Image (spheres, rainbow, N blue to C red):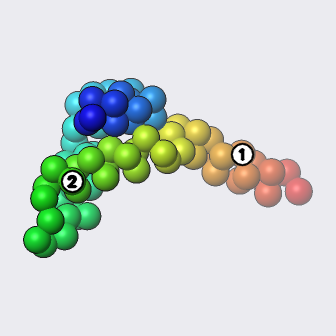
Amino acid sequence: MRSDLIFGALNHVTNRYELCQLASKATRKLHKPNTRVQDTTNEVFDRFKDTIPMDAASETVVDSLDERRAA
């Protein structure tokens, strides 16, 4: 169900408004002609659920930059 996908995506995007904005933008970009928009939206939420959180990804980039500067 879509509610399971949404709650799974909320683990990575804590703000529901931001999740809605990101999902709508991603749905527009990933949508293929002759497919249902609902299926594309479900795929987007599934991708959000499975990806690395944005905060954790930015922290790893900052950590790697700090390690390079220290060397």
Residue 22 vs residue 7: left or right?
A: left
Residue for point 18% across, 60% down:
28
Image quarter of the C terminus: bottom right
For disc 1, the marked residue is 63
Which amino acid is tagged 2? Asp
Left or right, residue 31 beside residue 5: left
Classify residue 50 as left or right of residue 27: right
Q: State if disc 2 and disc 1 touch (CB < 8 Å).
A: no
Q: Quadrant of residue 19?
A: top left
Compare marks 1 and 2 and give the one earlier in the sequence: 2
Residue 22 point in image, percent of width and height: 27, 46
Report the residue at 27% width, 29% height from top. 3
- C-alpha gap between disc 1 and disc 2: 37 Å
The numbered dot on residue 1 is none
Secondary element type, mark 1: helix
The image quadrant of residue 48 is top left
In the displayed image of the protein, which residue is found farthest to the front? Answer: 1
Instruction: Tell me residue 66's x, y (percent).
Output: 75, 48
Residue 29: image x %, image y %?
Answer: 23, 64
Q: Amino acid at mark 1?
A: Asp
Q: Position of residue 59 (x, y in %)?
A: 62, 41
Q: Relative to 33, say whether 31 is above or below.
A: above
Q: Can I make out residue 19 in this image?
A: yes
Crowd rating for badge 2 (residues with CA inside 10 Å; few <14, some 14–19, many 20+): few
Which residue is label 2 attached to?
A: 39
- Residue at image location 16% in from the left, 50% down from the top: 38
